């Protein structure tokens, strides 16, 4: 494996060095034959090196040294070539010889330092960079290379001492201050780290970045008064600094100043330099753990979302977040509006459409539900949910045959989703009964109960419809009792159970069931009232 290092010279530079290094006596009208020969060899060697003929280049540079033993350039180039051939010892010896012949040449010394770095001889590299930095006190490149070398050798104390010397000579430097701060932090010298920052801000009092770091250090140390002083200074310099505003939110939270905390959260939400997603991420970090458990937290979060409606009206994720929050609060009109806004911005997310369907369905606007469901079926043809909502609302509009067709199609798409299959079958059972197709209706009720023996609605409806046809009354009683036991405070279930008992001639027991709701008689439907009158008449006739 070859490894190329070093610097490339133009032919002009090569010739210049070769001429200057020659000790041969010049003829009065030009170069000596030795100089001409050396120059030719140097040019040929450089050419061979450039085209990758490393061994040929080495041979040519060796020939140069036979004619001109003090040619530092030849040694320098040989060092690079030997390193390419992975002969590190020869590379180092050649490079050192070049430096001995020309100790002031920075390129030679830097190449030796690079060889040491690449062979992980960091201590030796450090010595070379120290010399380069000393020889070139105003050259930042060598200062930086030496600093990097100190970092590689992990010679922290020597590095800090060097940085201090540089600062003493050139003045306080932000990069050096940050590096010393990091080094002291790694040494667990928090006091020293803080002092470096304090020295810097004393000279540069408007540097927000450094003031912010000092503020965070004070917060970590629970030095809240000092932290607030730094935050206040930053706020005076830049009142719109969003990072500082969020830091103040944390400060007010730590110091139990909740009204101020909310004030600064709202200030952050009104920032014109931070996008909605970043704001919402911060809001969720602040509120998420209590969002669904505490109504006050929910209201605060919602209030901040609503405050951003005008500023971020074109951000689909704002409307998504509003939609979800309104859904959690059961505010369906606003949930529907937020979903519609998101969709108008181009959102084609399945869940946002489901939320819109649910909100419209809860608001009992069948035409809108069907329209939304149709859009969803076009966008998501393999999803069963829109068929469920559409079929139910077609049934509400007494479009029974359409409802049956829609629900059957949705059922065929439900796959292995047992919960969805149960919902489709239950609705099909109800619609088939309304369409006076009892056989199909009872078939689907049976299927629901097989899927879920505790489905109280299916048990109740099936029992009631059997009783209307005076069929399988024992089975009807068993199902009605089970539904009633599951929810004994449900007046509809109680009525079904009482009516099945009535059909079986168990009038006293039927009356006992409905008597439990006698104090709510003004809430009874006309059907329940009629059933109760029939039970009373049957009892009276029985007692004669």
Image (cartoon, grey):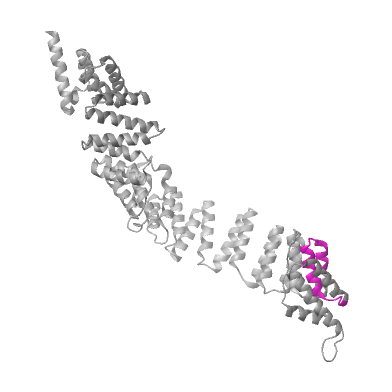
Q: Quadrant location of residue 2?
A: bottom right
Residue 325 picture location, percent across and down: 35, 45
- Find residue 429 and report its image quarter: top left
Q: What residue do we see at 35% from left, 59% from top?
A: 311
Q: Is residue 127 magenta?
A: no
User: Percent from the top left, x then y, of residue 326?
Assistant: 32, 45
**Residue sitting farthest toward the bottom:** 28
* 145 left or right, relative to 202: right
Residue 45 position in % (x across, y down):
79, 73
339 versus 452 height, above or below? below
Q: Is residue 70 magenta?
A: yes
Q: Residue at x 81, y 76 (%)?
A: 41
**How many numbered markers are drawn?**
0
452 and 210: which is toward the camera: 452
Q: Is residue 299 above or below residue 38?
A: above
- Left or right: residue 378 versus residue 114 is left
Tell me the residue at 44%/59% (across/down). Answer: 242
Q: Does residue 62 appear in the picture of this structure? A: yes
User: Foreground: 295 or 253?
Assistant: 295
- By secondary structure, the bulk of the magenta-drawn segment is best described as helix
Q: Nearer the viewer, residue 207 or 288?
A: 288
302 in relation to 238, above or below: above
Magenta region = 67-94
Q: Residue at x 33, y 36 (%)?
A: 409
């Amino acid at each position: 494996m070859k490894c190329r290092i070093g610097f490339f010279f133009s032919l002009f530079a090569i010739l210049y060095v070769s001429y200057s290094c020659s000790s041969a006596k010049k003829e009065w009208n030009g170069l000596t034959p030795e100089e001409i020969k050396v120059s030719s060899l140097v040019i040929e060697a450089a050419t061979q090196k450039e085209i990758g003929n490393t061994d040929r280049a080495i041979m040519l540079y060796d020939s140069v040294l036979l004619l001109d033993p003090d040619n530092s350039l030849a040694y320098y180039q040989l060092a690079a070539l030997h390193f390419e051939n992975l002969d590190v010892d020869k590379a180092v010896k050649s490079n050192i010889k070049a430096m001995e012949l020309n100790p002031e040449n920075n390129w030679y010394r830097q190449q030796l330092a690079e060889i040491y770095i690449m062979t992980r001889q960091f201590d030796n590299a450090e010595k070379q960079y120290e010399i380069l930095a000393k020889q070139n006190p105003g050259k930042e490149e060598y200062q930086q290379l030496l600093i990097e070398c100190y970092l590689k050798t992990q010679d922290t104390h020597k590095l800090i001492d060097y940085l201090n010397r540089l600062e003493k000579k050139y003045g306080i430097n932000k990069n050096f201050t940050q590096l010393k701060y990091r080094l002291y932090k790694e040494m667990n010298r928090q006091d020293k780290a803080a002092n470096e920052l304090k020295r810097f801000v004393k000279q540069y009092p408007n540097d927000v970045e450094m003031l912010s770091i000092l503020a965070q250090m004070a917060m970590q140390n629970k030095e809240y008064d000092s932290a607030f002083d730094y935050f206040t200074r930053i706020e005076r310099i830049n009142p719109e600094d969003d990072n500082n505003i969020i830091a103040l939110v944390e400060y007010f939270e730590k110091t139990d100043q909740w009204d101020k905390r909310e004030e600064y959260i709202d200030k952050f939400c009104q920032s014109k330099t931070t996008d909605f997603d970043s704001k919402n991420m911060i809001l969720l970090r602040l509120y998420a753990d209590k969002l669904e458990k505490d109504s006050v937290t929910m209201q605060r979060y919602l209030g901040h979302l609503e405050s951003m409606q005008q500023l971020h009206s074109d951000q689909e994720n704002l409307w998504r977040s509003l939609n979800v929050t309104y859904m959690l609060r059961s505010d369906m009109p606003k949930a529907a509006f937020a979903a519609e806004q998101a969709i108008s911005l181009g959102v084609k997310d399945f869940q946002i459409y489901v939320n819109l369907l649910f909100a419209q369905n809860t608001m009992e606007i069948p035409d809108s539900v069907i329209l939304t469901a149709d859009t969803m079926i076009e966008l998501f043809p393999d999803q069963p949910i829109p068929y469920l909502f559409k079929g139910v609302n077609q049934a509400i509009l007494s479009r029974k045959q359409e409802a049956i067709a829609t629900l059957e199609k949705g059922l065929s798409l439900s796959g292995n989703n047992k919960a969805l299959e149960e919902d489709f079958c239950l609705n099909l059972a109800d619609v088939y009964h309304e369409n006076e197709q009892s056989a199909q209706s009872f078939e689907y009720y049976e299927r629901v109960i097989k899927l879920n023996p505790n489905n109280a609605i299916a048990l109740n409806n099936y029992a009631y419809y059997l009783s209307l046809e005076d069929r399988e009354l024992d089975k009807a009683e068993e199902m009605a009792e089970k539904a009633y036991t599951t929810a004994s405070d449900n007046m509809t279930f109680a009525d079904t159970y009482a009516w099945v008992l009535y059909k079986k001639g168990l009038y006293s027991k039927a009356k006992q069931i409905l008597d439990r709701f006698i104090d709510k008689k003004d809430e009874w439907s006309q059907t329940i009232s009629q059933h109760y009158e029939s039970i009373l008449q049957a009892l009276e006739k029985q007692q004669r």
